[in-house]
Amino acid sequence: MKPVLGCLILLCSLCLACAHPVTSTTPVALTRCPIAGVAPVDSSWHQVRASGFTFCVPSRWRPSRPASDSLDPRAWSGKEGSLVWGLGRPDSVGAHARRAAEISVSIVPGGTVGPGTVPSSGRVSAPCLEPTTTPYTVDSVVVVVTQTACHGTWMTTAWSSTPAMYVQGEVHSPEQAQLLNAIVVTIRFISPAR
């Protein structure tokens, strides 16, 4: 009876372990960025292994979420800003900027603002820049980079539809936005095994 009970306990333990995977909390082993000649990328930057692609981040940036078994964490941050990577379609940068612009109507003393109207002085606050879109090709994949700034936050999204992936970052100054550009140009795609 004891061997059967022991086997049952072992079987139940294995079923529970398989049914509820545990998120890795072990520290991420940082790999040096293999890309050279892209300023300000240097050997102190480290590579992020995503699903089907890689990119590099500054050496002082650290993961802000746990890693999975075979991939690096999806969220990274440093004092300059933060970014996330993912599969599928990114959040719409244009929709975010339009929502922020709608909220930023200036109400002028003595004026009225209603649905579809502009304050009586005709002034509307427009702190959001129209998004710019720039495509480029890397490893035979077209990557589209969309950039905008709104209320002191600069947003950069690099995405591709085939494979469906994105890297999306936010910083708080134009100088730091240049750092996001440097990160984006380090994106490389992993060729499928043949």
Image: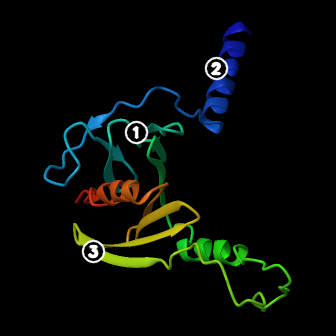
* In the image, farthest residue toward the top: 2
The image quarter containing residue 91 is: bottom right
Give the residue pinned by disc 1: 61
Q: Earlier in the sequence, mark 3 or mark 1?
A: 1
- What is the x, y in percent for residue 117? 78, 92
| Residue 141 placement: quadrant | bottom left
The answer to whether residue 185 is above or below residue 112 is above
- Determine the residue located farthest toward the front in the rendered image: 110
Task: Name the amino acid type tagged 2.
Answer: Leu
Left/right placement of residue 19 relative to residue 57 reads: right
Residue 136's tag is: 3
Task: Reply above or below: 64 against 152.
Answer: above
Q: Residue 124: image x %, image y %?
A: 67, 83
The circle drawn on residue 13 is none
Q: Residues within 10 Å of mark 2 (few under 14, many from 20)?
A: few
Q: CA distance from mark 2 to mark 3?
A: 53 Å
Q: Of the residues shown, which amino acid type is indicated by label 3?
A: Tyr
Q: Which residue is mark 2?
A: 10
> For the residue labelled by badge 1, is the local secondary structure a helix, a strand or a loop?
loop
- Going from N to C along the chain, the mark reached first, 2 or 3, is 2
Task: Name the residue: 72% across, 14% down.
Answer: 5
Q: Nearer the viewer, residue 193 or 11?
A: 193
